[in-house]
Amino acid sequence: MCGIAGMTDLRGVGSDVMDALSGALDHMRLRGPDGAGLWHDDRCALGHRRLAIIDLSEGGRQPMLHHGYAITFNGEIYNHEILREELEGLGHVFASRSDTEVILAGWRQWGEALLPRLSGMFALAIWDPAAGDLVLATDRFGKKPLVYTHDGDRLAFASDLRALRTILPGSGEIDQQALKLFFSLRFIPAPWTIYSSARKLPAGYVARFSRAGLSLRRWDDGAQARRPVFTDRQEAIAALRQQFDRAVGERLVADVPVGAFLSGGIDSAIVCASLAAQGRQVRSFTVGFTGAAAYYEERPAARRVARHLGLDHIEVDIDMGSAADVVDEVLDSCDEPFADSSALPVFLLSRETRRHVTVALSGDGADEIFAGYRKYQGELAAAHWQRLPALLRRGIAGILAGMPESKDRPVLELLRRARRFALHGDKPPAARQAGWMSLLSEAELQTLLPGWQPEPSVEGLVMALRQKADGADLINQVLSVEQSLVLGGDMLRKVDLMSMANSLEVRCPFLDRGVTDVAAAIPGNWKLQPGRGKAILREAFADRLPPDVFRLPKKGFEMPIASWLRGGLRDRMRAASDPVKLQRQGLIHAGPVQEWVDDLESGRRDTSWQLWALMAFQAWAARERLW
């Protein structure tokens, strides 16, 4: 795992580019604390920050050269030894044990056809001086970030937006479309970035830059979604177990210590159970909450799993004070506005885990692959809700609208969910799914943002993604959208930002291609049943864990943000929402923001997520010194 950066200038690379590239690497030192490397020829310069995981020798240093090609690569290729044997059989000779050299040899042998062969996570850049083109590529889920900016004969790229702007600053203009999407989703999905002059390379894409210009295409065509659907449940379970155990075993490939995250949920427990079933004993790590956040406590459940599996288990204690103390560190780790509050516990868990190991396995991706979130239950309930008389539905919605809500208090949290369901349950499928994932409606965004534009809308993005999954059943269509939009833009982004801020590599066996191919071929009603998400996943691994693990309610990593904003973070909230500041910035209307503050402080409505998004934006803007 590393940080990469580079620039191709078809007119020639000068010393100023190398100085800028060196500065970019400094920005990414936590992504690669084990060393830095620079390389250039007359038209291309590449840089690399190294977090040494495989082949710790000098043979694994980057940028790396191989038969005329040059590469800088961020990620891990778990099947590199298998590919190495195949390439050696084709006459290739290797000078190192590094997976990076395998990529270069494979590119020389197969070109872009190499990409579907790679089992792992990657963002890479390969320069071919003979052809005069630079190739950028990302893995199929976008686990590793890659941003770029294009200016005539020049193209710059990096793992981090701040590093990118050190190489080729571009316009500092805020992208109004990205700002709108941020306040709707709490993250900015690819291809947008907060700056209009920079873009993210989407998951599963390859880009080529040469004198012919810049072209992008999707190398991962989503063929797994068109596979025949399983008709035999036991056959599906057997295939899932086989592929998952293989994926977990592959992700232990490392020349450094490996551990595993272990929450109170079933996803990370299944990862740890697979490790134990394969006779692999690693340290497990969990995060726990005390004080006002005790509702989110998961340590007892994780402790039972660890005892059952015989794990060397380490717990990280978080109270309101310690979590609030790292708010600045968490927000400073984000290269653009990012407002998922669960980044705080992920940061703290990563920090503690890094004290013991360099690599950690996680259960990320299981919810989006096997339908684990509560909002998916809303899809099942919507059909029944829509059969009720319209007058009754309006009456229920009206009653719920007048009740208080709070994400920090269980009973009021149930009312909040019920209100949200009543608001979106009547809508058509794409609008309903957009409503589940959106923080603000289009009408609210139009009132909030002076630069509001009708497009893109979250509903439009969802509709386009659902069309690509046409032919799948309803639940698998929903999951396909979640994987494309939320998994890469929010969940994997959060894990990358918070783990890399602590120089920790996180690996996700649920996102292995073999696992996701099997999952895509499983009917949706085997995954999601009334009141029971991830049904087939629970069934597949029921023999490896105590029964009570599978009966625990879904919690997640949310934090008591509302309590913090009324307490220790109140001054920060007030500063972020200051109407004079907002008027000076000219990007956000003060009126709706003041309503958020009044609603939260009076207890009328829980607007903590909206205000946390505003604080995340203001923290980013202050760090960038935009005003």
Image (spheres, rainbow, N blue to C red):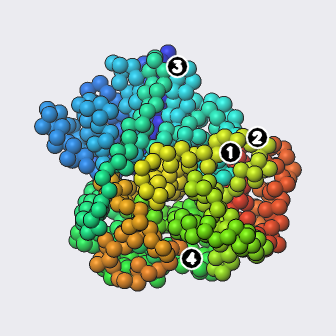
Q: As drawn, is 363 to the left or to the right of 342?
A: left
Residue shown at 36% from the left, 69% from the top: 536
Q: Which residue is mark 3?
A: 153
* Image quarter of residue 545: bottom left
Residue 523 image point, x, y percent: 37, 61
Secondary structure type for disc 4: helix
Q: CA distance from mark 4 to mark 1?
A: 31 Å
Badge 1 is on which residue?
A: 179
Closer to us: 387 or 587: 387
Is any part of residue 230 visible from this angle? yes
Quadrant of res 123: top left
- Callout 1: SS: helix
Neighbourhood count class around disc 2 (C-alpha, 10 Å): few under 14, some 14–19, many 20 upward: some
Q: CA distance from mark 4 to mark 2?
A: 38 Å
Instruction: Give the answer, above or below, for where 126 lies relative to 470.
Output: above
- 3D distance between C-alphas at marks 2 and 3: 31 Å
Instruction: Point out the image quarter for the C terminus.
Output: top right
Spot occupied by residue 577 in the image (x, y as percentages of width and height): 80, 56
Q: Are marks 2 and 3 in contact (CB under 8 Å)?
A: no
Q: Quadrant of residue 388?
A: bottom right
List x then y, in percent, for residue 110.
26, 32
Residue on which disc 4 sits: 296
Is label 2 or label 3 in front? Answer: 2
Crowding around mark 4 (Cα neighbors within 10 Å: few <14, some 14 to 19, many 20+) is some
Label 4 sits on what residue type?
Answer: Tyr
Q: Residue at x 45, y 71 (%)?
A: 529
For residue 155, above or below residue 535: above
